[in-house]
Image (spheres, rainbow, N blue to C red):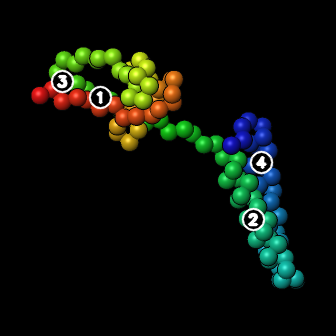
């Protein structure tokens, strides 16, 4: 993931390699080895261009709506009984998880039945 000037330098090198590769393929009637060399130039150019592109992070937001009144009781780690911060809850594959700051235990937060 190159940025700025380096990204454009890599794209320029890639474009030059593609042009050289095409020229080698065009001139392959004289020597057959030039066709393979042209393909190698183009393959290297595509490899450089692939890794020079800019990748954007994907952000997934999940909204939870509670229709009834809800009270948050204090959360404790089931491993070491330390108090946990409910703000550090992460949603992984649709389930809420918390990681304990003290013992690094990661567990799913479950709701106790009200009946």
| Label whose residue precedes the other's in the sequence (4 or 2) | 4
Asked if residue 47 lies left or right of residue 65, the reply is right
Please give the name of the residue rendered at 76% of the width and 71% of the height, measured from the top-left corner: 39
Query: Residue 10, which numbered label?
Result: 4
- Above or below: residue 24 compared with residue 108: below
Q: Nearer the viewer, mark 2 or mark 3?
A: 3
Query: Residue 67, which numbered label?
Result: 3
- Above or below: residue 83 compared with residue 103: above
Q: Is residue 87 visible?
A: no
Calculate the distance from the C-alpha at mark 3 to the C-alpha at mark 1: 10 Å
| Label whose residue precedes the other's in the sequence (4 or 3) | 4
- Above or below: residue 56 compared with residue 86: below
Q: Position of residue 21 (x, y in %)?
A: 79, 67
Disc 3 crowd, CA 10 A, few/some/many (<14, 14-19, 20+): few
Disc 4 crowd, CA 10 A, few/some/many (<14, 14-19, 20+): some
Calculate the distance from the C-alpha at mark 4 to the C-alpha at mark 3: 54 Å
Query: Residue 64, which numbered label?
Result: 1
Query: Residue 42, which numbered label?
Result: 2
């Amino acid at each position: 993931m190159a940025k700025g000037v380096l990204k454009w330098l890599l794209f320029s090198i890639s474009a030059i390699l593609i042009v050289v590769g095409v020229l080698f393929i065009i001139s392959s009637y004289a020597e057959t080895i030039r066709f393979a060399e042209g393909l190698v130039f183009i393959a290297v150019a595509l490899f450089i261009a692939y890794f020079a592109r800019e990748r954007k992070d994907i952000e997934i937001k999940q909204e939870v709506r509670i229709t009834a009144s809800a009270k948050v009781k204090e959360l404790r780690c089931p491993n070491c009984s330390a108090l946990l911060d409910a703000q550090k809850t992460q949603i992984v594959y649709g389930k809420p998880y918390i990681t304990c700051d003290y013992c690094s235990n990661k567990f799913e937060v479950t709701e106790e039945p009200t009946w």
